[in-house]
Image (cartoon, rainbow, N blue to C red):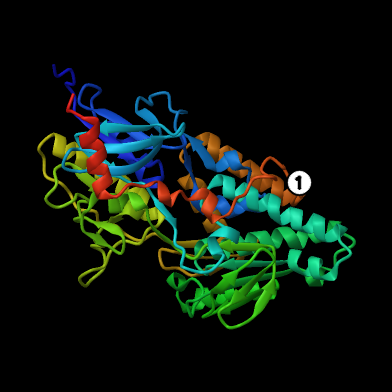
Amino acid sequence: MNTVTRPRILVVGAGFAGVECVRRLERKLNTDEADVTLVTPFSYQLYLPLLPQVASGVLTPQSIAVSLRRSKKYRTRIIPGGAIGVDIKAKVCVIRTINDEIVNEPYDYIVLSPGSITRTFDIPGLTDHAFGMKTLAEAAYIRDHVITQLDLADASDDPAEKASRLQFVVVGGGYAGTETAACLQKLTHAAVKRYPRIDPGLIKWHLIDIAPKLMPELGDKLGRSAQEILTKRGIDISLGVSIAKAGPEEVTFTDGRVVPTRTLIWTAGVVASPLIATLGAETVRGRLAVTSAMNLPGQDGVFALGDAGAVPDEAKEGDGAICPPTAQHAMRQGKVVADNVIATLRNQPLKPYVHKDLGLVVDLGGKDAVSKPLGIELRGLPAQVVARGYHWSALRTGVAKVRVATNWTLNALAGDDFVRTGFQARKPATLKDFEYTDSYLSPEQVRDRIEGSGTQEP
């Protein structure tokens, strides 16, 4: 007997795109019009652009993790887990819950916004020895790890050990890598004053990228300004260079240099979640090939956006342009895709995603920043005000805004602190420990599981 009377909308992922979609669905759908379910391992939205400031201790972890359950009107059902496969013909999503149970979740409409994973290459030792910067736990671990290197270097009488503990390598000259290197360099620069047995000249930060320019999206002038700021602060920037191999106490650059280090942070780009490959549908650079309305051609009720969808960029001339995987696009796309899901429910026409670029902001720590709001190039304190103002306004709740503003104020008045929490001190936190890329199913495995379990439409 069919007991389901309402269409089932399944949203995969609680990043910027998924959360904006769910919030809009809740506001615009009548309570008896559809059931909304969200699949996410964590019941919070992480404000990723501020993650480097958590790693450097400027912000506390909870200040950028916005609970999905704070809203009094929140009625979406949350499945705590991650989607590992989707059968678009059977309309079933396979989910691995946080207690490792695998369940089949039927749907009528699915919104795929599972985010991305770190882009790695076949570099010997990389996933075993490099740290990532995509999760709250990774940022907290890196902070503990960096302070630990200072503590151990201060206690050591071995020059070789001191050298390897006081050199830090960040790979990736995009926003994440540049801000991570900048914020953590500020932390170690302030901390070394409290370590009398460490020569400040021994602390060395390396920022490398295979690209010829630092943050090319900023343009030549601002990109050069950012590079000059970091160079003056003592960060060694190497462009056209990557990692040849990584070990526990040293890394080898592709130009032949060998740098003794215990800290390799990898932020060299992202790729779409492996979930997208389980659909067996056409992709563009790993992202699902969708229309400008963010639906999958030829499939009823399948939408993809954010890092997962290759959404055509209607604001750019020329064929083939797709929207970059940025928070700004994801938040806007989430609202439009919610409207299109509702339009599909109500047999109304879909609308394309068209945007106007608001600009770019890069926070380099302290009073250093470069920003390009609405095409206007800013540097220094004005850029810092714009950067922090943009991030502050983008935070979803008043509680998060108060926490972040308080943290910024306290840091500006009292400076950094150098406390290790120690709660992850004996747990590994390298790339291979956080990105469960071997958990996803192949399209054939998805079909076999669904057929074998006898999943039926309720």
Q: Position of residue 441 (x, y in %)?
A: 32, 47
The answer to which of 62 and 335 lies nearer the viewer is 62
Name the residue located 46 percent from the left edge and 31 percent from the top edge. 99
Side of 344 relative to 156 (left or right) = left
Image quarter hosting the N terminus: top left
Query: Taking 409 as reference, is 208 left or right?
Result: left
Give the vertical position of 128 relative to 340 (above or below): below
At horizontal 65% and vertical 44% (from top left) the residue drawn is 407
Q: Nearer the viewer, residue 306 or 128?
A: 128
Give the residue at mark 1. 419
Looking at the rendered structure, the secondary structure element under dot 1 is loop
Decide which of 287, 120 is in the foreground and name it. Answer: 120
Question: 370 and 165: which one is in front?
Answer: 165
The total number of labels drawn is: 1
- Residue 268 screen position, x and y as percent: 49, 65
Above or below, comparing residue 389 to residue 206 in the picture:
above
User: What residue sits 69% from the left and 53% below the top?
Assistant: 145
Q: Is residue 365 visible?
A: no
Q: Position of residue 386 (x, y in %)?
A: 52, 57
x and y, in percent, of residue 327 in the image: 41, 53
Dividing the picture into quadrants, the one containing residue 96 is: top left
User: Where does the C terminus fall, quadrant-wise?
Assistant: top left
Amino acid of disc 1 = Val
* Quadrant of residue 356 within the rendered picture: bottom left
Tell me if 116 is positioned left or right of 178 in this view.
left
Would you call the spot at circle 1 few (<14 residues within 10 Å), some (14-19), or many (20 or more)? few
Q: Is residue 239 above or below residue 165?
A: below
The answer to whether residue 120 of the structure is visible from this angle is yes
